[in-house]
Amino acid sequence: MAGLLEGKNIVIMGVANERSIAWGITKSIHREGANLIFTNRQERSYKKLLKLLEKHDITPKLMVSCDVADDNSITEAFGKIKEEVGVIHGLVHSVAFANREDLQGEFVDTSRDGFLLAQEISAYSLVAVTKAAKDLMTEGGSIVTQTYLGSERVIPNYNVMGVAKASLEASVRYLAEDVGKRNIRVNAISAGPIRTLSAKGVSGFNEKASVIEEKAPLRRSVDQDQVGDATLFFLSDLSRGITGEVLHVDSGFHIIG
Ligand code: NDP
Ligand code: KAL
């Protein structure tokens, strides 16, 4: 049987290493026959990704550098993708950043620069890459981003990132309306805590992860492969009637009061 994404060209932004959510997504969509186009910011991530691809015997269609903080970098990256690949059918946005000092203590102490930085990298970047990607999605398409429950509730330490994720989720809805007429869908996955490079060194992670195992309906933590398969659903035709949605992949934790 043909894979769900056979012959589809999918851009994946945000693989830093084997633990990245974007790597879980890569494995799911590779399994279903997608052609993979990767973007990285840091050289270190690019090298890690090269090794990972080799280890898993995956041949990417293209790898380009892209810093979402820089409009020229986005234009160049999507220009190269257009040149080398032409049409794309999907985009995975798995990128976020805030200063470490803004991910502890009280939200009220967030600096102007820290607030703007978190918004720029973690929310505005979805707007900027959707604008660039939509012109390459001439056969329709699907855009999927990654969010977290801290957008809906006050979660200690998530602070400035919670506000950025609220902005990201609202952007998903506004973008869905804009690009819907081109048959492009925009959705988000709200994942439970997963130990990744981003989660490393930020206080509060262990606590949040253990609460899932105790209190979530499924009483187990979430992993990259579960997020990978849910993202695959959004990228595939199985979700053709869904746009502007935030889907929780969190063992059901968000329904518990
Ligand atoms: P990773 O650290 O593996 O991935 C974060 C990625 O963001 C890195 O690949 C990094 O690229 C990229 N990035 C940061 N700044 C930029 C930039 N300016 N331009 C381009 N790329 C950039 O962590 P995760 O996999 O955990 O994070 C992926 C997404 O999942 C994030 O949006 C995160 O908020 C979200 N999420 C994570 C959860 C978790 O528990 N881990 C839970 C819910 C949501 P580089 O390495 O090249 O700098
Ligand atoms: C309540 C939770 C505990 C953790 C609190 C905040 C987590 C914020 C996520 C944010 C993306 C982390 C950073 O920006 C880290 C950054 O300051 C330093 N790290 C880096 O520069 C590394 C090297 C690169 C690869 O990282 C990035 N991002 O570029 C939230 C937990 C329970 C769930 C999580 C971790 C959610 C989430 O959004 O990631």
Image: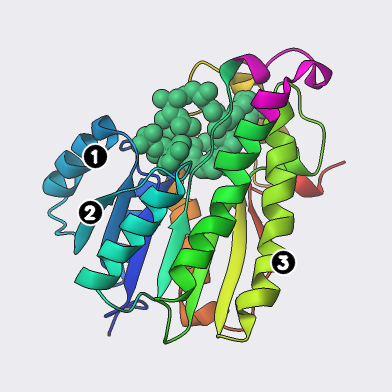
Q: Residue at x 32, y 77 (%)?
A: 8
Per the image, label 3 sits on a secondary structure element best described as helix
Number of residues whose C-alpha sits closer than 10 Å to that of mark 2, classed few (under 14), some (14–19) or many (20 or more): some
Is residue 220 shown above or below 26? above
Q: Residue at x 27, y 77 (%)?
A: 86
Image location (x, y in percent) of residue 158: 69, 27
Does the magenta portion include 112? Answer: yes
Q: Estimate the spatial distance between the alpha carbons at disc 1 and disc 3, rounded to whole Å.
A: 32 Å
Instruction: Specify the segment rendered in magenta.
Output: 101-115
Look at the magenta stretch and give its main secondary structure: helix
Q: Estimate the spatial distance between the alpha carbons at disc 1 and disc 2, rounded to whole Å.
A: 8 Å
Q: Is residue 199 visible?
A: no
1 and 3 marks in contact (CB < 8 Å): no
Q: State the scheme by which the image is colored.
A: rainbow
What amino acid type is highlighted by mark number 2? Answer: Met
Image location (x, y in percent) of residue 130: 52, 64
Residue with the mark numbered 1? 46
Q: Is residue 5 visible?
A: yes
Does the magenta portion include 207? Answer: no
Number of residues whose C-alpha sits closer than 10 Å to that of mark 3, classed few (under 14), some (14–19) or many (20 or more): some
Q: Is mark 1 within 8 Å of ligand 1?
A: yes
Residue with the mark numbered 2? 63
Q: Quadrant of residue 220?
A: top right
1 and 2 marks in contact (CB < 8 Å): yes
Q: Residue at x 31, y 36 (%)?
A: 17
Q: Residue at x 66, y 60 (%)?
A: 247
Per the image, label 2 sits on a secondary structure element best described as strand
- For this view, does 219 lie left or right of residue 25? right
Q: Quadrant of residue 215?
A: top right
Q: Report the front residue among 208 and 181.
A: 181
